[in-house]
Image: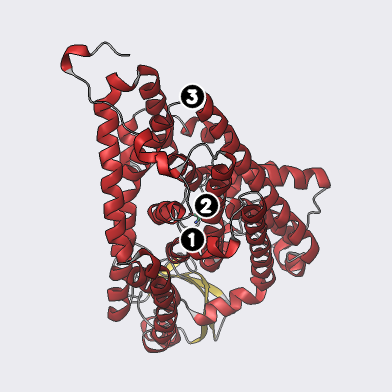
């Protein structure tokens, strides 16, 4: 498949995916799910909570603290049919049932299941490539730069752009949330209410220690990308220090692996129009429209704030590409199109990494720059996530009835950058590391689950912004290092094969 045509095909895939998703909503809506929480109104009492237990099948419905009803399979039953089903099973006259909380969709109608499997195959193929791709590209990228001083300058510039743009993103978020104040309408309801959702806490020291894996193989198995990066970068420096002759077998191996990975990426990208379409169809088709519209009534202003701030930051990134990266922004968006589409469909910058790498190469960026800047960025540089963390934390503060001072907001912005760097490039990762920022300003994490329910569309947008930041930085670094020319890539990476007799190094 021609690389030029892929952008258009993915676009068609997105449109078809959206239509298919809307059709699914009509013809095959998902029913109740394991883990769903409902408010049940009966003839005798108002608003009791009912839960469909997870894991045990078939399970009795939990209403309040009691398990009631027969042991039927509760998940999958259409929510509109639940009142009658509960009445039949328990004898309690149920007037209405309303979905309050949903952890995810695992029980689907048959047709949706087929779409799910199709999308998941594409996602798994992408994720399958990530670990070998990161190791091979980062190692070859650093080792073939050869010149340690140049490498230092390149690394310093990349880190500076990454941190500066994430701080700008958090700042944009703060400006929007302070202006729109989406938390204010919820202040009365939220400041008195607390739910008991606990979310894994991560302290700053845990985040720092996470960088160093105690066992690189374990890091690979657990897909601990930060740990893998740390080990690979050290190994690349070791190759540089040992010299080209002694390390040639290892270098050449990874260079061949690198080339092979790009052959595989080409094959997987040919599936992108279908894969992205199916992922989007599944995301849309498995929504519960009533639930979503109730949520949006309360959180619509918040979603709007996040959206406006993300769009603003996206424009800022394009301005940087234009004026500092000296690259046509329309061309930039066109070339990055396939990666943006995959980010939109997968909600994961890590899964998108193989596609981002290909797109950045098309922008005239040297492989030696791309191989270093993009994988590191996919893991650590998350402008969209930093922005989202800042907006959400200040939104929580507004809704919980706290007015944060300027210095507290500054702290939120800085910690949002730290939390974004700590977030993995996977769906909704930003919500998990948000606890760091929340605890620093003394806010409870009780409402994170509420945001989680509407996170999918917001995550789609911030993942696009995340990968755009990586591509923008590659382009800017290329402009600042004109001496690293794409044309010289092949010559620069030639390592000699070691002769057994001369293994004492250079
Ligand atoms: N899904 C985002 C990414 O992969 C991370 C996040 O903000 O949740 O880039």
The residue wearing badge 2 is 471
Question: Which residue appears farthest toward the top when viewing the image?
Answer: 504
- For the point 39% across and 30% down, the residue is 143
Q: Is residue 18 visible?
A: yes
Rendered position, 419 above or below 37: above
Residue 186: quarter of image: bottom right
- For the point 37% across and 86% down, the residue is 88
Residue 120: quarter of image: bottom left
Question: Which residue appears farthest toward the left when viewing the image?
Answer: 500
Q: Circle 3 sits in a helix, a strand or a loop, which is it? A: helix
| Residues packed near mark 2 inside 10 Å, few (<14), some (14 to 19) or many (20 plus) | many
Residue 263: mark:
none
Specify which label sits upstream in the sequence, 2 or 1. Answer: 1
The residue wearing badge 3 is 148
Query: Mark 2 touching mark 1, by CB under 8 A?
Result: yes
Residue 336: mark:
1
Specify which label sits upstream in the sequence, 2 or 3. Answer: 3
Any atom of ligand 1 within 8 Å of the CB at mark 1?
no
| Residue 392 coordinates in the image, percent (x, y) | 66, 57
The alpha-carbon separation of the residues under discs 3 and 1 comes to 30 Å
| Residue 75 coordinates in the image, percent (x, y) | 35, 74
| Residues packed near mark 1 inside 10 Å, few (<14), some (14 to 19) or many (20 plus) | many
Q: Is residue 263 left or right of residue 475?
A: left
């Amino acid at each position: 498949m021609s690389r030029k045509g892929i952008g258009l095909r993915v676009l068609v895939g997105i449109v078809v995916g959206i239509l298919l998703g809307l059709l699914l909503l009509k013809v095959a809506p998902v029913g109740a799910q394991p883990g769903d929480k409902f408010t049940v109104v009966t003839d005798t009492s108002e608003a009791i909570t009912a839960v469909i237990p997870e894991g045990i099948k078939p399970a009795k419905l939990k209403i309040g603290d009691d398990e009631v009803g027969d042991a039927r399979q509760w998940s999958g039953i259409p929510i509109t049919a639940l009142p009658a089903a509960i009445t039949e099973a328990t004898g309690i006259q149920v007037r209405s049932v309303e979905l309050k909380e949903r952890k995810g969709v695992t029980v689907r109608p048959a047709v949706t299941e087929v779409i799910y499997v199709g999308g998941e195959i594409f996602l798994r193929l992408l994720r399958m490539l990530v670990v070998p791709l990161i190791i091979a590209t980062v190692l070859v990228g650093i080792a073939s730069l050869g010149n340690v001083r140049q490498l230092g300058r390149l690394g310093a510039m990349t880190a500076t752009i990454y941190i500066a743009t994430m701080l700008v993103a958090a700042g944009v978020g703060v400006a929007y949330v302070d202006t729109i104040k989406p938390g204010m309408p919820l202040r009365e309801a939220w400041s008195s209410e607390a739910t008991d959702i606990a979310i894994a806490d991560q302290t700053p020291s845990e985040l720092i220690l996470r960088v160093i894996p105690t066992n690189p193989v374990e890091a690979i198995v657990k897909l601990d990308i930060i740990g893998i990066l740390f080990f690979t970068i050290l190994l690349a420096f070791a190759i540089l220090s040992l010299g080209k002759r002694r390390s040639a077998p290892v270098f050449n191996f990874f260079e061949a692996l690198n080339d092979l990975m790009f052959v595989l990426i080409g094959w997987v990208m040919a599936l992108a129009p279908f894969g992205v379409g199916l992922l989007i169809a599944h995301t849309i088709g498995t929504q519960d429209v009533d639930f979503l519209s109730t949520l949006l009534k309360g959180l619509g202003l918040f979603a709007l704030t996040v959206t406006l701030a993300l769009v603003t930051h996206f424009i800022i990134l394009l301005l940087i590409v234009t004026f500092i990266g000296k690259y046509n922004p329309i061309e930039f968006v066109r070339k990055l199109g396939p990666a943006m589409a995959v980010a939109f469909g997968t909600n994961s910058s890590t899964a998108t990494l193989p596609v981002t790498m290909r797109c950045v190469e098309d922008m005239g960026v040297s492989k030696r720059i791309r191989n270093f800047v993009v994988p590191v960025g996919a893991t650590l540089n998350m402008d969209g996530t930093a922005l989202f963390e800042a907006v959400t934390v200040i939104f929580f503060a507004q809704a919980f009835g706290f007015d944060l001072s300027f210095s507290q907001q500054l702290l939120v912005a800085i910690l949002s950058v730290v939390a974004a760097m700590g977030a993995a490039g996977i769906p909704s990762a930003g919500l998990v590391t948000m606890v760091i920022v929340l605890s620093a300003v003394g806010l409870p994490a009780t409402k994170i689950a509420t945001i989680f329910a509407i996170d999918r569309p917001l995550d789609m947008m911030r993942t696009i912004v995340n990968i755009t930041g990586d591509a923008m930085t590659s382009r800017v670094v290329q402009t600042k290092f004109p001496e690293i020319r794409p044309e010289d890539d092949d010559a620069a990476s030639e390592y000699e094969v070691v002769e057994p007799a001369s293994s004492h190094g250079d």
